[in-house]
Image (tube, rainbow, N blue to C red):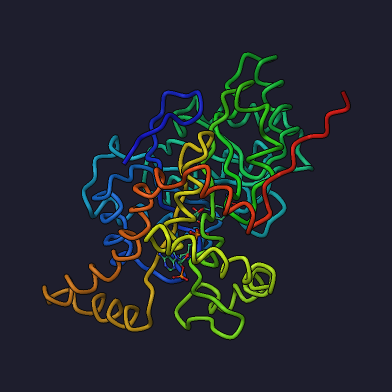
Amino acid sequence: MQYKNLGRSGLKVSQLSFGAWVTFGNQLDVKEAKALLQCCRDNGVNFFDNAEVYANGRAEEIMGQAMRELGWRRSDVVVSTKIFWGGAGPNDKGLSRKHIVEGTKASLKRLDMEYVDVLYCHRPDALTPIEETVRAMNWVIDHGWALYWGTSEWSAQQITEAWGVADRLDLVGPVVEQPEYNLLSRHKVESEYLPLYNNYGLGLTTWSPLASGVLTGKYTKDNIPPDSRFALENYKNLANRSLVDDVLKKVNRLKPIADELGVPLSQLAIAWCASNPNVSSVITGATKESQDALFKLILYSMSSQSTSSEADGASLAKSKIQENMKAIDVIPKLTPDVLEKIDAIVQTKPKRAESYR
Ligand SMILES: NC(=O)c1ccc[n+]([C@@H]2O[C@H](COP(=O)([O-])OP(=O)(O)OC[C@H]3O[C@@H](n4cnc5c(N)ncnc54)[C@H](OP(=O)(O)O)[C@@H]3O)[C@@H](O)[C@H]2O)c1
């Protein structure tokens, strides 16, 4: 595993990281989470991502408890969480000073940690002045609750404005942005944010490298594996938006490229994200693959006495993570020729700006 600086900051994050969205609290509880987190650590991952909204806070509780029970040294890992959607009340969401301070406090309590390494503003808040948010994030840092702060899915304009405020007030600006980035979604990372990498030393921790599993090739319109994300009731809308003919055709056409390289499509897709030099870390997510695996996981969680089923369940839980982490070895295989073939299929490479000269 390589460790890259998070943008211009001194913080080192593993090139591949692991996040808790959907999985922790919806598909997994503490026992399974421990097996997955330890597998990540065994593969060199040091960065773990969360958010106050994931499973309504349960994902933070699971991650915190799992890390505690695993006995990890806090300084060995980089833990992030995100603030924006904290509840139903008018002051439980957004990026006001009130919600940033109260939301962060509540997240730390759930994580049972004194601080997070990186605190993100999960979305931009059109109803709060950016100056209020920049000041509040600095307050949180000054109180030791977070070491760095960043944004998620902000526009280049909003990030530039945040840096303008920070520079004017001699405060700390956002060191990192967390955008979606995968073979199907590239505009922000490859076009809109281009000036920010040099101007502000912005780092990126990117999400959904597999487009929620679509880029593994396991989905067709008629086949949604019963234990997969798109089979979950709350994610039917995402499934409907994602499993469209154009996308599925592209995924099918990518498969022969992965075959030629002798790697699973999932590894090709993750390696492709990690190969972008502006990406500090690719946040992966994984549970298990087959129903059989899920069944064995349930058995595992019920039989904490039995060493053999424990080992069995843990190894099943680990298999997807191990597969995904091997993506690191695929990066050198992405030659200009291979990248060109990929671009011709996905047709998502942003066009270069027109020259009027
Ligand atoms: N900032 C934001 O707004 C934002 C938004 C989304 C995510 N994120 C972060 O990014 C992290 C990763 O996002 P993501 O979970 O959407 O990543 P992803 O890699 O696009 O999708 C992960 C899902 O794909 C399936 N999968 C993973 N590896 C597989 C493999 N080798 N073979 C078959 N299926 C596989 C698994 O789901 P099933 O097995 O259940 O199908 C897994 O949970 C999140 O946990 C979160 O920390 C941030």
The correct choice, above or below, for 187 with respect to 161 in the image is below
Q: Tell me if residue 24 can be seen.
A: no
**Nearest to the observer: residue 97 or residue 63:** 63
Along the line of sight, the residue nearer the viewer: 244 or 329: 329
* Residue found at the very far right of the displayed protein: 356
Q: Residue at x 35, y 52 (%)?
A: 64
Q: Residue at x 65, y 67 (%)?
A: 247
Q: Is residue 6 left or right of residue 64?
A: right
x, y (%) of residue 282? 47, 46
Residue 166 in view:
yes
Q: Residue furthest bottom?
A: 222
Image position of 323 (left or right of 235) = left
Quadrant location of the N terminus?
top left
Q: Quadrant of the C terminus?
A: top right
Judged left or right of residue 336, residue 186 is right
Above or below, 313 against 44 in this view is below
Q: Residue at x 30, y 52 (%)?
A: 40
Marks counted in the figure total 0
Please determine whether, in this image, residue 1 is positioned above or below residue 240. above
Q: Where is residue 250? Give x, y as percent.
A: 62, 65
Image coordinates of residue 251 in percent, x first then y, are 57, 67
**Residue 265, position as x, y percentages in the image:** 46, 63
* Nearer-the-camera pick, 305 or 245: 245
